[in-house]
Image (cartoon, rainbow, N blue to C red):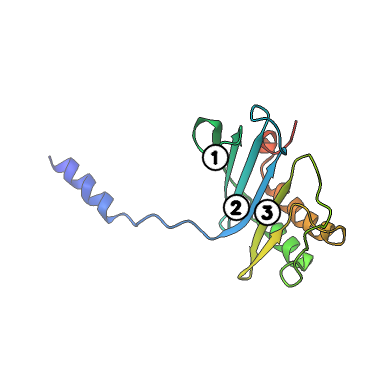
Amino acid sequence: MLKPLALLLALSAAPALAEDAPILAKYWTNNGSLPPEYAWETDVTILEDGALTLKHCTGYETEGPACKTRRAKVAEDALDAIRTAARDSGLADNPARETDTPMVGGGLTGGLVYLDGKEVKLLSQPTEADAKRVGMVLTAIASAIPARFDRFLDAD
């Protein structure tokens, strides 16, 4: 009887679990508009503390057995690379503009970064003038995602 009581007291005295860290970056990609049996979408969230969550869904589903969630830890240097790319892009103060001639067919990739209290939007179809700036930040985020998750990010 004393052992369960001691365990209960120990657990109640343990510090509460810390809340999730703020979001640093979000990254999403899909393989375009296809019949449900071929369609997939992947969403990645990276927190300031390096916690990464990847959710991959097929067939236009957003929950249930068609979706798989994976977790990983992103190294501090990769987090710094995302911050640096976002800062160097100038997108926080000079946001990218959406193209007037949207792509037809094919997959899309986009995202966002929270930098110094600002949301830096990474459009999936920026103007040609903004594509390089958006691309360098998306590349930094994609590089932070562990290689073992590549199968959830590529159309093949």
Label 3: which secondary element: strand
Q: How many tags in the picture?
A: 3
What amino acid does circle 1 point to? Thr
Q: Position of residue 32 (x, y in %)?
A: 72, 39
For this rendering, which residue is in front, 107 or 36? 36
Q: Position of residue 39 (x, y in %)?
A: 67, 33
Residue shown at 69%/33% (left/top)? 151
For this rendering, which residue is in front, 150 or 128? 128
Label 1: which secondary element: loop
Q: Quadrant of residue 106?
A: top right
Tell me which numbered mark, 2 or 3, is placed earlier along the sequence.
2
Can you name the residue that lies furthest to the left here? 1
**As displayed, is residue 52 above or below residue 39?**
below
For this rendering, which residue is in front, 146 or 24? 24
Of badges 2 and 3, nearer the viewer stands 3
Can you name the residue that lies furthest to the bottom here? 93
Mark number, residue 46? 2
**As displayed, is residue 89 above or below residue 33?**
below
Neighbours of disc 3 within 10 Å: few (<14), some (14-19), many (20+) = many
Per the image, the residue denoted by label 3 is 111
Q: Is residue 143 left or right of residue 22?
A: right
Can you name the residue that lies furthest to the top here? 37
Per the image, the residue denoted by label 1 is 62
Of badges 2 and 1, nearer the viewer stands 1
**As displayed, is residue 81 above or below residue 87?**
above
**As displayed, is residue 5 above or below residue 133?**
above
Mark number, residue 77? none
Residue shown at 63%/41% (left/top)? 42
**Contact, mark 2 vs mark 3 (Cβ under 8 Å):** no
